[in-house]
């Protein structure tokens, strides 16, 4: 399977606010925007699909007023269909849903688009690439989890590298240039292999908000990713 260095594709950095200071979200987002962030990754967790509980529609509504960057809402919840409209009405531009909870994924993807957002499908580390074979032509992006969802600050699962390559091959076979987003454990030590494998959009929480200077951390991580993609 061929790697994709030097393809010159556009890398987008999606800082995950899960690792930010929730009492200062406006300032945290402004900082990463100055550092070159391209979209804001919002991790919505329900305490059922994943063990953790995080944020909901009202926070997305407030974020919408705080930034002009696209809001990239990752729904880690059992029944995402119920919440598509509220999240998109609140200002979500990109909405990703887990294939593991959706028996009618085609309908869900169509619904996200109909509501005016870009539709992403997410694969857990143990979910085979084949699970999105029949929907590959229809998605606006694919999100490959490189940790088990539920928490920030986990260790990157190396097998993801091979999986990114196989998702790219599947999308290419379907004639879909849709980007691949990768989420979990991305930092200065893992970003090179992730981008080389074909990742276009990079989610990073701890690597950006975990130190003292989110602006600089965003700038450094994006610069490294762009250097690899060139
Ligand atoms: C995990 C979330 C991730 C998480 C990434 O369930 O989907 O977006 O915030 O955090 P880091 O980059 O710290 O692994
Ligand atoms: Zn996420």
Image (cartoon, grey):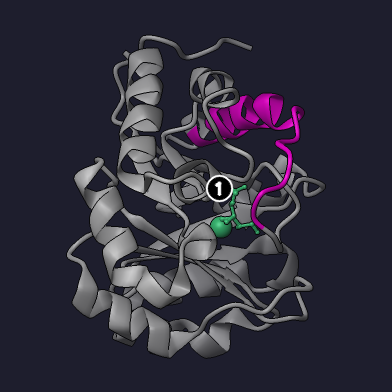
Ligand 1 within 8 Å of disc 1? The answer is yes
Q: Of helix, strand and loop, which one carries label 1? A: helix
- In this orientation, does residue 213 appear? yes
- Would you identify the image quadrant in which residue 151 lies? bottom right
Q: Is residue 64 left or right of residue 45?
A: left
Seen in the picture, residue 112 relative to 61 is either above or below; the reply is above
Quarter of the N terminus within the rendering:
top right
* Residue 132, x across and y down, in percent: 64, 50
Seen in the picture, residue 215 relative to 30 is either above or below; the reply is above
Front position in the image: 141 or 57: 57
Q: Is residue 43 left or right of residue 6?
A: right
**Residue lying farthest to the right in this orientation:** 126
**Residue lying farthest to the front in this orientation:** 212
The residue that disc 1 covers is 206
Q: Which residues are magenta?
A: 152-171
Secondary structure that dominates the magenta span: helix
Residue 189 covered by magenta stretch = no
- Would you identify the image quadrant in which residue 216 lies? top left
Quarter of the C terminus within the rendering:
top left
* Residue 213, x across and y down, in percent: 37, 44
């Amino acid at each position: 399977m061929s790697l994709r260095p030097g393809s010159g594709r556009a890398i987008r950095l999606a800082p995950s606010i899960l690792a930010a200071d929730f009492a200062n979200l406006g300032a945290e987002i402004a900082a990463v925007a100055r550092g070159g962030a391209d979209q804001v990754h919002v991790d919505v967790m329900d305490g059922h699909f994943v063990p953790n509980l995080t944020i909901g529609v009202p926070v997305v509504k407030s974020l919408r007023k705080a930034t002009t960057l696209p809001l990239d809402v990752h729904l880690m919840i059992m029944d995402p269909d119920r919440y598509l409209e509220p999240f998109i009405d609140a200002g979500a531009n990109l909405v990703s849903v887990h294939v593991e909870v959706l028996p009618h994924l085609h309908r869900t993807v169509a619904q996200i688009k109909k509501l005016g957002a870009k539709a992403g499908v997410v694969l857990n580390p143990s979910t085979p690439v084949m699970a999105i074979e029949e929907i590959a032509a229809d998605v606006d992006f694919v999100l490959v989890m490189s940790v088990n969802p539920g928490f920030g600050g986990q260790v990157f699962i190396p097998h993801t590298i091979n999986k990114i390559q196989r998702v790219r091959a599947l999308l290419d076979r379907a004639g879909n240039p849709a980007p691949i987003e990768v989420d979990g454990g991305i930092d200065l030590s893992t970003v090179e292999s992730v981008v080389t494998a074909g990742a276009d959009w990079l989610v990073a929480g701890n690597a950006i908000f975990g130190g003292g200077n989110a602006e600089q951390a965003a700038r450094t991580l994006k610069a490294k990713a762009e250097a690899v993609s060139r």
